[in-house]
């Protein structure tokens, strides 16, 4: 379960016992601490979620508690405008509009659909259910990615997967899954077998030759592994230009360490940088 899903579950439970005021980012002009749709909920007993911290969140929390104490706001909520300049002591420089809405038990049924509004999620195809793969999944589920997780072995995947880990598939041969990947997928290749890795890379390059819709192909391993793969892929008819599309080793340069969790951080940071055009 992702962090957002856990927060929504906590809010649903809270609303069975007491009302709360939902504060959502309704509009952002210029720079703001959080994106459109970010939210927090305030009750008499505490807070769930965040709209970015700092003075904006402090003032919004005070407003929400005042509305809660006055049995407000009215149905439909109210909008408040906050200029993030010197008056709030925040240097973002933008203007944020927040919507304040009162929630009670009757709002539980539709709450999850409202707060899990569809957002653009980058598709990622992860080949490999080993230690590094699992560490990567733990990071991706709290980030704007849709994950397809593949491995040719049985009983590799954990029994519970987050909603955005769309397909935990057992593909045999595993490279046969490549033509069916979502367009625009970032591909991570880290199977238990060098032979499988090679076949997956070859299938990705064949797809690139036909469609050119895989913006990132990352292969785990050393420079010597890639040197060996390059020779074999050249022998299979791949060109130097095609091989240049493969990143090996993967992971953001400068992050040291070979523990699965460290590698995962470096790889996910590289995906985020790629996603932002870096």
Image (cartoon, rainbow, N blue to C red):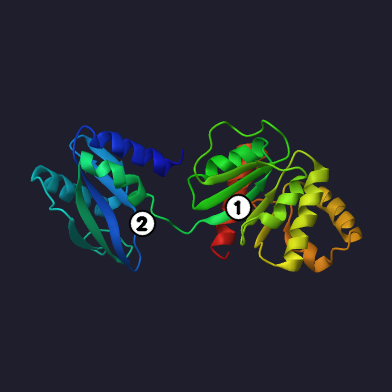
**Residue at the spot of label 1:** 124
Q: Nearer the viewer, residue 145 or 151?
A: 151
Q: How many marks?
A: 2
In the rendering, at what x and y percent does residue 258 appear?
68, 39
Residue at image x 24%, y 44%?
107
Residue 52, can we see it? no
Q: Quadrant of residue 214?
A: bottom right
Q: Is residue 212 above or below residue 22?
A: below
Quarter residue 112 falls in: top left
**Relative to residue 29, is residue 217 drawn left or right?**
right
Please state the horizontal and vertical placement of residue 221, each as a whole percent of the image.
Answer: 76, 46
Q: Assign a secondary structure to mark 2.
A: loop
For image coordinates 84% across by 63% down, the residue present is 238
Instruction: Read off the residue under disc 2.
Output: 34
Toward the right, the furthest residue is 235
Q: Nearer the viewer, residue 107 or 231?
A: 107
Snapshot quadrant of residue 240: bottom right
Q: Secondary structure at mark 1?
A: strand
């Amino acid at each position: 379960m992702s962090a957002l899903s856990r927060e929504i579950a906590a809010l649903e439970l809270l609303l069975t016992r007491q009302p709360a005021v939902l504060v959502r980012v309704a509009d952002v002009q210029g720079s703001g601490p959080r994106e459109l749709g970010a939210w927090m909920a305030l009750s008499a007993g505490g807070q769930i979620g965040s709209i970015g911290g700092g003075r904006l969140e402090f003032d919004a929390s005070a407003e929400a508690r005042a509305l809660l104490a006055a049995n407000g706001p009215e149905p439909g909520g109210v909008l408040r405008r906050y200029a993030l300049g010197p008056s709030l002591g925040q240097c973002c420089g933008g203007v944020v509009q927040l919507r304040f809405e009162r929630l009670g038990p009757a709002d539980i049924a539709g709450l999850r659909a409202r707060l899990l509004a569809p957002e653009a999620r980058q598709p990622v195809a992860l080949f490999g259910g080993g230690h590094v793969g699992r560490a990567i999944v733990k990071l991706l589920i709290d980030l704007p990615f849709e994950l397809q997780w593949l491995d040719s072995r049985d009983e590799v995947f954990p029994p519970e997967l987050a909603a955005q880990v769309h397909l935990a598939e057992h593909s045999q041969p595993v490279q046969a899954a490549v033509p069916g990947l979502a367009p625009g997928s970032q591909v991570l290749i880290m199977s238990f077998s060098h032979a499988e890795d090679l076949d997956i890379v070859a299938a990705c390059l064949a797809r690139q030759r036909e469609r050119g819709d895989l913006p990132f192909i990352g292969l785990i391993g050393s420079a010597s592994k890639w040197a060996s793969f390059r020779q074999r892929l050249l022998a299979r008819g791949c060109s130097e230009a095609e091989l240049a599309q493969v990143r090996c080793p993967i992971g953001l340069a400068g992050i040291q360490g070979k523990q699965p969790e460290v590698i995962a951080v470096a790889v996910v940071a590289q995906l985020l940088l790629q996603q932002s055009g870096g």
